[in-house]
Image (cartoon, rainbow, N blue to C red):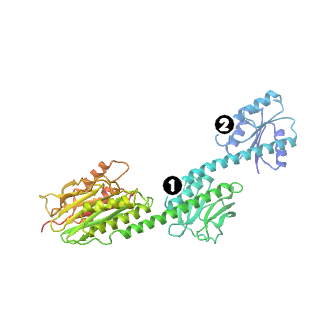
């Protein structure tokens, strides 16, 4: 029922107007002065104002202007009535200052009711159109936010928070999490925190399609919906082998036919499917990477070895980082590489390069020859791909090493301080960069070259991929300096040393895979 505010300082006129409106099916509030009218208008809930032009404390024109300037209720229609200001210039003046209609007394009751009805129809249609436009604009923004996340919980939180903003009401979003368990995301209103927890409501086996129904709010106790109203339950199911998605909002918060609610539910379901596909590809690539990495590094007398492999975070795409530690005869081969790109394809290219590296090493080739053959393989069989690779060949008896580097970040060599006490928990020393390197694999510029390095007793070699040092907020030189500074002290337990490097140098949330191989030659005696 619409509420009409009748403002007139003459009680008899106010009574007559109010009686006609009540018989027409409207609720009526009354005011005798402009101040009373503005005070009642400020409280809200007024759908139309019938305003006399002559009031004891202000003109109706001034009161109308103040109502139309209100930041919240300024669109409320106003009808001027007058028995004195009846000339064309008065009517023009009233309409120019904001009134939606102007009636001159004596007023016919049918004319009053017809005018009120016509203006309310236009006003309500305008409000509906504005609300629809606003909600569609918010829906575009919320959809973009949902499509920007790659974790199911984060998606549900974004959906519930965005839905509360769109409908300006409490909302429930019920879906399955990444493990298949039914969860509910509840938001009590715009700006409120989202609570994601297991869903205790028993939902049926919904058919495929999109549908909505009005139900009692008591069936959905996870949130305090208005107790005297109903809720509108939207169900979206795209396939018979996929669980249904539920969106629940107060019925009063939706438009006729629920067009925005339907679009919102479909947007949430589309984003959910995208997250599911991302999880499947991410898990497949991780499984592939882990299956291709060495299951157990070889034990070499006189040497300590620590290895770390950290996959990218769940919100990042999979990469092509890999490492290899293999012993062939009296030589130990250590390699760390990185395939360009972040995708399942990069992981498969990584697998081909790792297998080819092992094959060339078994054939007896040295580091430079292996890189040359890998370069030929990439250019002929994997055109368009690029990769970096740093390969060491270590004579375990003498500590002499040959290194060939195809565009990979430079490894670090830590030499202990000869005057330091061996009883110290951390061995101080100096760190140098082995900077010699050639072009990336996949780019034919020149043949690979080898660098001779000796791993003296007590010395430590650090190999890593760029995921350990690259941050968007600093240059590579700055990142490398942080790594070098953290590498100066080496714990007696090499595993602790590797873990500290990851903690001190690596990013809090990796956006790329990290491979770290640390080799130490034990001190003499």
348 horizontally vs 128: left or right: left
Q: Residue at x 23, y 66 (%)?
A: 493
**Residue 67: where, in percent of width, then height?**
69, 38
For mark 1, does the 10 Å Cα neighbourhood hold few (<14), some (14 to 19), or many (20 or more) residues? some
Q: Position of residue 220 (x, y in %)?
A: 63, 65
| Image quadrant occupied by the C terminus | bottom left
Crowd rating for badge 2 (residues with CA inside 10 Å; few <14, some 14–19, many 20+): few
Q: Quadrant of residue 444?
A: bottom left
Q: Which numbered disc, 1 or 2, marks the residue closer to the eye?
A: 1
Per the image, the residue denoted by label 1 is 148
Q: Is residue 428 left or right of residue 507?
A: left
Q: Quadrant of residue 156?
A: bottom right
Q: Is residue 85 visible?
A: yes
Q: Measure the alpha-carbon separation of dots 1 and 2.
A: 39 Å
Residue at the image point whose x is 69% and y is 37% from the top: 68
Secondary element at image label 2: loop
Q: Across the whole image, how many numbered discs are drawn on residues? A: 2
Judge by depth and name the residue closer to the eye, 212 or 433.
433
| Mark 1 / mark 2, whichever is N-terminal | 2
Where residue 7 sits, quadrant-wise, is top right
Circle 1 SS class = loop
Q: Residue furthest front?
A: 380
Label at residue 98: none
Q: Nearer the viewer, residue 160 or 511?
A: 511
Foreground of the two, 149 or 108: 149
Residue 415: x, y in percent?
17, 58
Q: Residue 515: give x, y in percent of width and height.
A: 33, 62
Image point 21% across, 65% down: which residue?
Answer: 394
The residue to which callout 2 is attached is 69
Q: Is residue 247 above or below residue 327?
A: above
């Amino acid at each position: 029922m619409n509420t009409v505010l009748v403002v007139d300082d003459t009680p008899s006129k106010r009574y007559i107007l109010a009686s006609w409106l009540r018989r027409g099916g409207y609720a009526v509030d009354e005011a005798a002065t402009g101040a009373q009218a503005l005070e009642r208008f400020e409280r809200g809930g007024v759908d139309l104002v019938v305003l006399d032009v002559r009031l004891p404390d202000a003109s109706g024109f001034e009161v109308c202007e103040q109502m139309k300037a209100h930041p919240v209720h300024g669109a409320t229609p106003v009808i001027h009535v007058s028995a004195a200001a009846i000339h064309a210039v008065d009517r023009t003046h009233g309409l120019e200052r904001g009134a939606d209609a102007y009636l001159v007394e004596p007023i016919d009751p049918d004319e009053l009711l017809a005018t009120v009805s016509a203006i309310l129809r236009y006003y309500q249609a305008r409000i509906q159109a504005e609300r629809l436009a606003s909600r569609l604009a918010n829906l575009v923004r919320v959809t973009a936010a949902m499509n920007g996340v790659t974790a199911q919980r984060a998606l549900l939180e974004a959906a519930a928070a965005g839905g509360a903003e769109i409908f300006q009401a409490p909302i429930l979003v019920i879906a399955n999490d990444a493990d298949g368990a039914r969860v509910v995301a509840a938001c009590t209103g715009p700006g409120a925190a989202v609570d994601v927890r297991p869903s205790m409501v028993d939902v049926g086996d919904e058919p495929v399609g999109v549908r909505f129904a009005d139900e009692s709010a008591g069936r959905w106790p996870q949130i305090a919906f208005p107790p005297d109203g109903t809720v509108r339950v939207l169900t979206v199911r795209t396939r018979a082998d996929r669980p249904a998605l539920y969106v629940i909002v107060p019925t009063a918060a939706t438009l006729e036919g629920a067009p925005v609610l339907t679009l919102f539910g479909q947007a949430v379901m589309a984003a959910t499917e995208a997250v599911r596909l991302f999880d499947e590809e991410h898990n497949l690539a991780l499984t592939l990477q882990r299956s291709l990495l060495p299951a157990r590094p070889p034990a070499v007398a006189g040497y300590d070895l620590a290895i770390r492999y950290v996959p990218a975070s769940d919100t990042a795409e999979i990469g092509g980082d890999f490492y290899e530690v293999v012993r062939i005869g009296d030589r130990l081969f250590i390699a760390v590489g990185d395939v360009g790109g972040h995708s399942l394809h990069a992981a498969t290219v990584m697998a081909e390069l790792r297998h080819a590296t092992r094959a060339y090493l078994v054939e007896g080739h040295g580091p430079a020859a292996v890189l040359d053959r890998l370069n030929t393989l990439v250019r002929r069989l994997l055109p368009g791909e690029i990769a970096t690779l740093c390969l060491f060949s270590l004579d375990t008896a003498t500590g002499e090493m040959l290194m060939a580097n195809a565009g990979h970040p430079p490894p670090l060599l830590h030499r202990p301080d000869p005057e330091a006490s061996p009883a110290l928990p951390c061995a101080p020393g100096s760190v140098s960069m082995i900077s010699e390197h050639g072009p990336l694999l996949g780019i034919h510029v020149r043949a690979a070259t080898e660098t001779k390095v000796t791993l003296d007793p007590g010395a430590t070699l650090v190999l890593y991929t760029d995921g350990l040092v690259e941050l968007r907020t600093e240059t590579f030189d700055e990142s490398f300096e942080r790594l070098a500074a953290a590498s100066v002290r080496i714990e007696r337990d090499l595993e602790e040393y590797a873990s500290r490097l990851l903690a001190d140098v690596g990013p809090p949330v990796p956006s790329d895979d990290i491979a770290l191989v640390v080799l130490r030659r034990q001190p003499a005696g």
